[in-house]
Amino acid sequence: MARTTSVFTKVRFSSLLMGIGGVLAGTACAALSGNSEIIPASLCMLFVIFLQQAANFYYRYHDLSRNSGGHIDQRILTKSKKGSFNFLKEASIAMALIALMIGLTIASMGGWWTFIIGIFILLVAWLACGGSNPLLRTPFGVICSFIIFGPVCVISTCLLQVMHESTERITWSYLIPAVYMGVVMGLMSFNATLLYGYANFTTDLRNSKVTLVGAVGRRMGRIIFLINGFLYTAITIVMCLELHLDLNGVDMLPSVICLLIDIYIWWQMRTRPRYQHQQLIDLGNFNVFLMGLLSYIIFEITGTPDLSRMTFFGL
């Protein structure tokens, strides 16, 4: 008899790295103009973590309540279906309430526009994980990841920090880096989500879950994955050239490193046996995080000196 596993081993905590990477990328864009702020950045990161976990648990709850098959294939049922059902429901509500409290704190700092962003995020999250046919069970699931972890996460994180202590009028020049990086992180999150469909291709088809890979096939899925890698690298290079960042190519280094990792993943998609493809999902999620982290480190060091009037620990 197949052994069941804890739900925590299958919720895929590495998926949180996509949201964290987006927040780091937004903070990196704010650092370019000397506006990186630790408190707004930390709140954005906590909001993303708890809201994403709420969505993860709710998606599992929805799968179990609709008998969609994901729980059965991944053997994550606990001792009783009712116990697993109640746990997933309560965990989703708890995470959502924490995210709501953090979101209200962010709104008190950012103003009315943050409510619009918050409502939009909740709407996309619901369409992705809930309803009669969640978008994550369709070819459009990758679009949700592109939008939320890309432009929405990066631009809103950057704007919140730029506005935090600014006494000047916010101009388009502050947000140009975030627009570029939003598309870059969106494409990387697109790739990371595509890996889920690639790794679960057979079981998804058995459960009538037609992801993008299920719709176009594994070969075309690999082609799309590789094209996205070269595309976000090209966008990063254009961004660095357009912004006239005189860093002797160091500003392009994060994108090149992540492209090499994506090429490695693409090759492994072709050569690894199917039962090992699950490991590629974690690597794809980590790659999004790595892009945000390296960009933040480089732009924090080389960007405009910090303009903040606030100091921490005497620094």
Image (tube, rainbow, N blue to C red):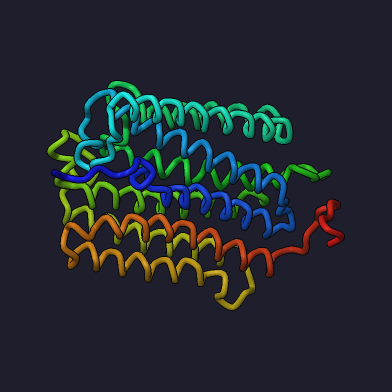
Check the image and report above or below for 100 versus 152. Answer: above
Q: Nearer the viewer, residue 165 or 102?
A: 102
Check the image and report above or below for 303 versus 16. Answer: below
- In which quadrant is the C terminus drawn? bottom right
* Horizontal side, residue 125 vs residue 82: left or right: right
* Horizontal side, residue 199 vs residue 100: left or right: left
Q: Is residue 244 visible?
A: no
What's the residue at 23%, 41% (across, down)?
75
Check the image and report above or below for 1 versus 66. Answer: below
- In which quadrant is the N terminus drawn? top left
Q: Nearer the viewer, residue 314 or 303?
A: 314
Indicate the quadrant where residue 250 lies. Answer: bottom right
Q: Residue 234, position in %: x, y?
A: 43, 64
What's the residue at 71%, 54% (across, down)?
36
* Horizontal side, residue 15 vs residue 241: left or right: left
* Horizontal side, residue 313 vs residue 238: left or right: right
Indicate the quadrant where residue 102 lies. Answer: top right
Q: Residue 128, position in %: x, y?
A: 37, 32
Q: Residue 76, position in %: x, y?
A: 28, 40
What's the residue at 71%, 51% (across, down)?
38
Q: Is residue 196 visible?
A: yes
